[in-house]
Amino acid sequence: MKKNKFDFLKKFIVIFGLLPVFLFTACSDDDDPVLEDPIATFQYEISDQNWLEVTFMNFSSNATSYSWNFDDGNSSTEENPTHVYAEAGNYDVTLTASNAAGASASFTQTIEIKDPDEALALLAGQTSKTWKLYRVDASMGVGPNIDAPYDWWFLENNGSRPCVYFHEFTFTRNMEYIFDDKGSFWGEGGIFNESVEGTCFEAIPGNMIGPNGEDLSAWLGATHQFEYVPSTNTVTLIGEGAWIGIPKVATDGEVSSPQTSVSFKIEITQHDGYDHMYVKFIYDWGVWVFNYASYSDPNLEPDVVEEAEPWGEDLPNLTPTELGHTFESETSFDHLGAIGGTSVITVGQDDPAGGETKVGMFERVAGQQWQEAQLRTYPDLYDIQFDNFDVAKIDIYIPSDTDFTEGGLQRFFVFGFADMSQTQEWWNSPTQFFTDGDDVVVGEWHTYTFDLTDVKEREDIDMIFLGIGGGGHEAGGIFYVRNLVFE
């Protein structure tokens, strides 16, 4: 019995005595979890009650300790500190985030501390301050992002829209916003009735009409209110029809009727004899920007160019008896052989409905907000005279699975005529036809016919265009066209 008891003890010691060694071996350095490198980032918020007080929100990851440098000689090791600055200024705040292994990462962001009274004085003066579109270089523009704000279109003081340079926008210290239209208004394309579209017209309610009779008179000169948040550089105009820049440019995108308020960002810089205000509307799809000036020395203000210099060239006239394109091949056309535009027509494609004749594939290119396919005469460019034709016809096929959703493709197309050779902004003076809703046939070929009475009255048309799917969005789409004919 003693021997058996001794054997049991030896087995106990061997088995359980080795256990700590096993456990120690299992926790060796090679099996330590790998610590991910820290990522440092933060946001901040300036107090509404004390414009010198800033609360920092730490959004770092993989970190256990933090070090803040507030760029004014002060620092903190709190995770989410609040700091009070002594004076206004720009400060490069740096957050360093570290982990237990000693690895660290830093993130620096510049914050602007503004005295709200001084900031308001820059915008609204001591009692009031009047701003006008800047008359040097580009006064406004639209582009894909804030780094390229003039890529898609821009306006200069060249006589093309003189009335907009006379408009006055006044901010007062009692928070009033006053727009003075100076008796004239610009007919923004697609927003105003075609009778005034693309022209400077008399600013009276009777002329402030949309394409379908909408009342746009709230955009005329009036007094509104405004709010200004210097810490975020945000201005909000309050009142029916209050606007700046272009009436259609609103808080969240472009609109076709007056809004009750509009918000935007501003940057004001001071120069010798004048102040400059940069107005920014930033959207998901792109940006609108506007440049304004307020002159303390009126002698520095350039004159408005009221008459545009001649632009382009007057093309020779062509009065064809046959005109059109079947889109079967590169050569299946009568005169209209130059195909261009942002939307792409590729000829000689298979018929989506199973027909034997080749057709054209119309691609509305994704990522482009406004676009159309264009046809011009080939090999030489001409102004087309439509004396021998009464109607235009085109077959269009819209696939049945086309996704018409809000904010995307629209059940809509436009067929139009314009002058590109002598009109710098041809889209402001086209003759065009719109088809939408149930009039747009889906899932089969359909022939659309357009009366050319108004077209025949013009002598300057050198381009025919087709847009499918609407505008104001970046959705792409594939459609088909065939048999563009004039009879």
Image: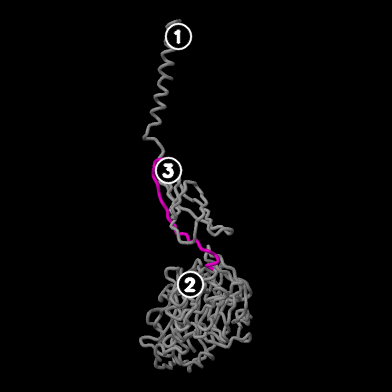
Q: CA distance from mark 3 to mark 1?
A: 53 Å
Tell me where residue 64 appears, x and y as whole percent: 46, 43
Q: Amino acid at mark 1?
A: Lys
Q: CA distance from mark 3 to mark 2?
A: 42 Å
Tell me where residue 58 appears, x and y as whole percent: 49, 50
Q: Which residue is mark 1?
A: 5
| Contact (Cβ within 8 Å) of mark 3 with mark 1 | no
Tell me where residue 46 appears, x and y as whole percent: 54, 58
Q: Of tags 3 and 2, which is closer to the observer?
A: 2
Residue range in magenta is 100-119
Q: Quadrant of residue 323?
A: bottom left
For residue 205, which numbered disc appears in the image? Answer: none
Q: Is residue 109 magenta?
A: yes
Q: Amino acid at mark 3?
A: Asn
| Helix, strand or loop status at disc 2 | strand
Quadrant showing the N terminus: top left
Q: Is residue 125 above or below residue 53?
A: below
Q: Between 118 and 15, which is closer to the camera in this rendering?
A: 118
Q: Amino acid at mark 2?
A: Tyr
Q: Is residue 159 magenta?
A: no
Q: Which residue is mark 2?
A: 278
Q: Residues within 10 Å of mark 3 (few under 14, many from 20)?
A: some
For residue 99, which numbered disc appears in the image? Answer: 3
Q: Between 134 and 365, which is closer to the camera in this rendering?
A: 134
Q: Residue at x 41, y 38 (%)?
A: 33
* Residue 194 seen from this side: no
